[in-house]
Image (tube, grey):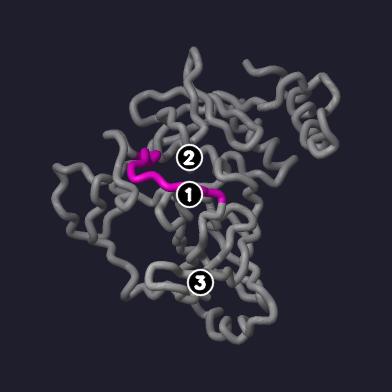
Amino acid sequence: MAVAASPDLLTLRPIGYARTALASKVEAARQPRATGGAPGRIDLLPGRSFEHALEDLQGWELIWVVFWFHLNASWRPKVLPPRSTTGRKGVFATRSPHRPNPIGLSSLQLERVEGLSLYVRDLDLVDGTPVLDIKPYVPYTDAHPLARSGWLEDERLARPEQAPSDPIAPFQVGFAQRAAEQASWIERMTSLAVRDRICSTLALGPTPHPYRRIRPLDDGFQLAIKEWRARFTVAGRAVHVSGIASGFRDLHRPASSAGTDGLQAVHRQFVATFGPPG
């Protein structure tokens, strides 16, 4: 709900909040489709007649969710998008969260509505994100598959004659046998879909970038996914993930706090199973 307090000032009130496994900005995907279908929930606030506002929404496959980037305290007129190979871009030509008014927009898959809760997939929001509005995605008016993609397109490409795929071809991500076994182990022992997260992140580009938790190593690169570290090399547009390691140091020592004890126990078991990084 918005109330105009003056010609240049608006007051916004959240209608609800996102509930997701993502605790920090670095864990969130840059776009909904990069989440690998991550599930989540949007809980609307009680006592404001929203149960009536949700009537008839169930039949829509996709919804637009308008939200507030509540963890951003400032904005930047020029930003460096993860996919830019030619330097910084004007923030209005990007999906960066660092905006004058930190308003975000995501198209999410709607699975079901239960009471005041919307169960969705492709949720790319941090837990506790304030939701400002929900609208149905209407394909005949919201989809423009032949639209140009600005700086994402190669300037040599003509306007597409049919619905295009991503204008930047994804990198092909492959796993060594050891890395695949490690990813399967992590997924069995935790709720983290680590392989999908590695693939979706590196398919966008394996170049070190301040927002993507990729850094160079002596013999390749390392990607951080929560407390795990995936090591990889790059040849052309092929990415080879050679192994996954724990991001914890000194696992032989007692856990530093009760809050991390269970998590560190999983990492100790991982090291006991696979040994130190090769």
Tell me if residue 210 is in the magenta stretch.
no
Q: Position of residue 76 (x, y in %)?
A: 39, 44
Q: Classify residue 24 as left or right of residue 267.
A: left
Foreground mark, 3 or 1, reads 3
Relative vertical location of residue 2 with respect to residue 190 in this rendering, above or below: below
The residue singled out by tag 3 in the image is 133
Mark 3 residue element: strand
Mark 1 residue element: helix
The residue singled out by tag 2 in the image is 201
Q: Give the spatial CA distance, label 2 vs label 3.
A: 28 Å
**Would you call the spot at circle 1 few (<14 residues within 10 Å), some (14-19), or many (20 or more)?**
many
Type of the residue with mark 1: Ala
Q: Position of residue 270 (x, y in %)?
A: 74, 28
Q: Which residues are magenta?
A: 71-83
Picture residue at 49% right of the left edge, 76% below the top:
3
Q: Classify residue 4 as left or right of residue 131.
A: left
